[in-house]
Image (cartoon, rainbow, N blue to C red):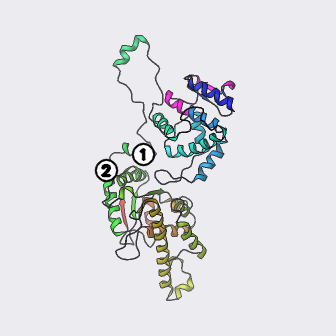
Amino acid sequence: MLARVRSVVKYLLNGGYRIFRSGSGPEEDGMTDRKAGASATGTGVRALFAERFALLYVTAGDPPLKRVADAVERARRLDERGRPIRSTAQRISDWRRGRNVPARFAALSVVLEILIGEARKHQPQPPVEGLYDLSAWRARWEEALTSPLSAPDPAPAAEESDAAETPPVDGGLCPYRGLAAFGQEESGWFFGRERATTTLVERLAAAADEGGITMLVGASGAGKSSLLGAGLLPALTGGALAEQGSSTWPVRTTTPGEDPLRALTELIPELNEVLATADRRGAAPGAADRCAEDVEDPGSEDRDAEAEFRFAESVRDAVGAHVRRAAGDEARLVLVVDQFEEAFTMCRDERARALFVQVLNACCTTGFAGGTPPGLVVLGLRADFYARCLDFPNSPKRSSTGRWSWAR
């Protein structure tokens, strides 16, 4: 093992730009010259990034890819947008083979921490300076991410004068995302939606004062996810809300998926006990869960209202505790639920769906006049599902505090 690492290090220190395959060393022809068709296409910076990552992987004992991916999931880390970090075995393999550079350092850093921990067990001192240093890895990643995908061959001497007159081509990252949504990291490339962003911030500011869910509704492909990720979130962190300290309020972003309640508890673990209590009751609190016998009981509505109020207060207490731990007593949570239509298309449990909406509504409302809700809630919703939201008791059209904005 040590001899194999040393042979790789010796090659790197000699200035080689090659990639070795998992399970082989340079003596087994596991190192392939880039010009001969290696996986690591692009400039020497990108190739060096891939080689150093592969070197770290070998130093860590060449663990199975799935084991590393499982360790990332067990770490339960959140990215800068508050979403759980997951790295698949295929993605890690692509980084190691030099097929691409990670788009976000948050995902890479978790994998690096796992590999560095394993590597220290095999070799306490790094075979190459900076191999165990996360700050060095960030600098190397940033350089690789912004480097050209490919480097042109040098022009012959006879053509140097013509080449000098040709304006250089910017070979950096392409700012056009195609069908992919813009995220907070791409906000610098997000243009033309300033008015929509301002409108959304204004609606959210009103909700911060009066409470209620803010809904961004638009047709499929209208750019709702981009407006939320690259428009609203950077505006909030930039202090667009007039609320004191709002630029540092914790932001959590999720999508409902098949289990919206689990998606919530992954972001806000303090809700686990509240939802477990509701689950032990066997029904979500509220009038929607009354049975036929209760309808005949004139006091059932009062009991339902009381149960719903207690549940909502429990949610507010849990969310408030989460915010205090994350950002202090004066902060509030900003919860963004994109692709809310998944609550209908992917979640098959109607009770879970209703409970999900109750939690969201409780998070951004208060149980008494003059109170301050612990959070702000923004939903991104496909327009053809808007009518189905009206079935919920606290939907925007049924509640005086509900707000919605169209993405166009």
Q: Name the foreground residue: 370 vs 396.
A: 370
Q: Where residue 128 sits in the image (x, y, percent)?
A: 57, 31
Outermost residue, front direction? 125
Within 10 Å of disc 1 (Cα), the crowding (few <14, some 14-19, many 20+) is some
Q: Quadrant location of residue 37?
A: top right
Horizontally, is 241 left or right of 351 in the view? left
Where does the image place residue 126, in percent across and percent down from the top left? 59, 35
Q: Amino acid at mark 2?
A: Glu
Q: Which residue is mark 1?
A: 185
Residue 113 higher or lower than 335, as above or below: above
The magenta stretch is 26-50
Q: Amino acid at mark 1?
A: Glu
Q: Which mark is residue 194?
A: 2
Q: Position of residue 380 (x, y in %)?
A: 43, 58
Give the quarter of the figure containing the N terminus: top right
Q: Position of residue 226 (x, y in %)?
A: 41, 50
Residue 96 magenta: no
